[in-house]
Amino acid sequence: MSGKLTPGRLMLMAYVYLVLIFVLAPIVVILPMAFSEPDYLTFPPEGFTFKWFGAFFGNARWMDASVFSLKIAVLTSVVTVVVGTMATYALMRGAGRLGTLFQGLLIAPIVVPHIALAVALYLFFR
C-alpha cells in the first residue's frame, strides 16, 4: 500500500482516531480521580493521595474478590483459546454435512440475538 493520503484513507484515519479517543477518554478522566483526596469523585481532582489504593489492597474482602475474578478470567481465557483453536481446526478440516452443521452451531450465538431483536421489534411495531 502506498503512502498517499487519499480522501478515503484520510477519512479512515480520522475515524480510527475518533474511535480511539472515544475508548480512551473515560480512562483519561477516571484515572486521575482515583488519586483524588476527597471521599467523593470530583473532576478535576483535588489533591493527590494513594489512600484509596491502600484501602483497597489492605482490605481482605476486596483482595479475595480480585483474586477470584483473576482466577475466573485466566480459566475463561484458557478454555476460550482451547475451544476456539479446536473450532477453527474443525472448520478448516471439516467437510460435508457435518462441517456445515458445525459451522451453523458456531455462528448461532452471533445470529440468534439479531433474530430475537427482529421478532421483538416486529411484535412491538405490529
Image (spheres, rainbow, N blue to C red):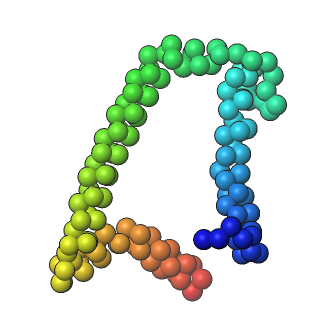
Quadrant in which the C terminus appears: bottom right
Quadrant in which the N terminus appears: bottom right
Q: Which of the two residues, 100 or 66, is positioned nearer the viewer here?
A: 100
Residue drawn at x 70%, y 64% is 13
Is 115 above or below relative to 54? below
Residue drawn at x 37%, y 30% is 68
Quarter occupied by residue 102: bottom left
Residue 116 seen in this snapshot: no
Residue 86 image point, x, y percent:
23, 60
Residue drawn at x 54%, y 20% is 56
Left or right: 92 in relation to 59: left
Left or right: 92 in relation to 9: left
Residue drawn at x 68%, y 67% is 3
Q: Which of the two residues, 56 or 78, is positioned nearer the viewer here?
A: 78
Residue 17 seen in this snapshot: yes
Farthest residue, direction bottom: 126
Is 103 above or below relative to 42? below
Q: Which of the two residues, 116 or 6, is positioned nearer the viewer here?
A: 6
Q: Which of the two residues, 38 or 3, is positioned nearer the viewer here?
A: 3
Count up the numbered dots.
Answer: 0
Residue 73 image point, x, y percent:
38, 40
Residue 96 image point, x, y percent:
18, 84
Residue 99 image point, x, y percent:
21, 77
Left or right: 64 in relation to 105: right
